[in-house]
Image (cartoon, rainbow, N blue to C red):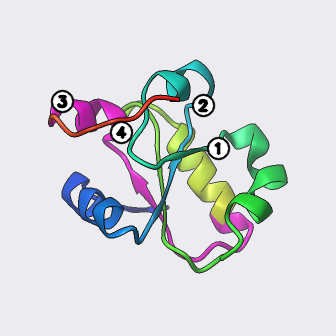
Amino acid sequence: MTALITRDELKAAIEAGSVTVLDTLGGEHYAKQHLPGARELVLADVDARAPSLLPDRDAAIVTYCSNPGCANSGQVADRLTGLGYTNVRKYREGIQDWVEAGLPTESA
């Protein structure tokens, strides 16, 4: 099971520039609203895009989707781990929690 990260930990990591954040919803959801600096990566694209998008397999990576009921972030995190990425965590509460806390988002 993928390790979790809290909202406060993630916010600090984003502010420090020490993490790559992956939006696993993709498409219209990503275009409309995503966490600051987040990159789009859906499960169907992980194998093809991960090597170029995430060249450092030891770098800090956090996946997220909409809320705890969404499985996308866990599926992408598990696939990345299966590909040899060693520092993958999941923001289980997702963008819903981020927005409800009044934190900033970006749009494409």
Q: Residue type at mark 1: give it.
A: Leu
Q: Earlier in the sequence, mark 4 or mark 2?
A: 2
Q: Secondary structure at mark 3?
A: helix
Within-10-Å neighbours for mark 2: few <14, some 14–19, many 20+? some
28 falls in the magenta region = no
Q: Amino acid under label 4?
A: Gly
What percent of the width, then of the height, locates residue 13? 32, 66
Q: Residue at x 39, y 42 (%)?
A: 35
Figure check: 57 above or below 49: below
The reply to whether callout 4 and callout 2 are in contact (CB within 8 Å) is no
Residue identifier under label 2: 26
Tell me the tag on residue 100. 3
Q: Which residue is mark 4?
A: 94
Q: Badges 2 and 1: C-beta atoms under 8 Å apart?
A: yes
First in sequence: mark 3 vs mark 1: 1
Q: Which residue: 24% across, 31% down?
A: 99
What residue is shown with label 1?
41
Question: Is residue 82 rendered magenta in the image?
Answer: yes
Q: Which is nearer the eye, 7 or 79?
A: 7
Q: Which residues are magenta?
A: 81-101
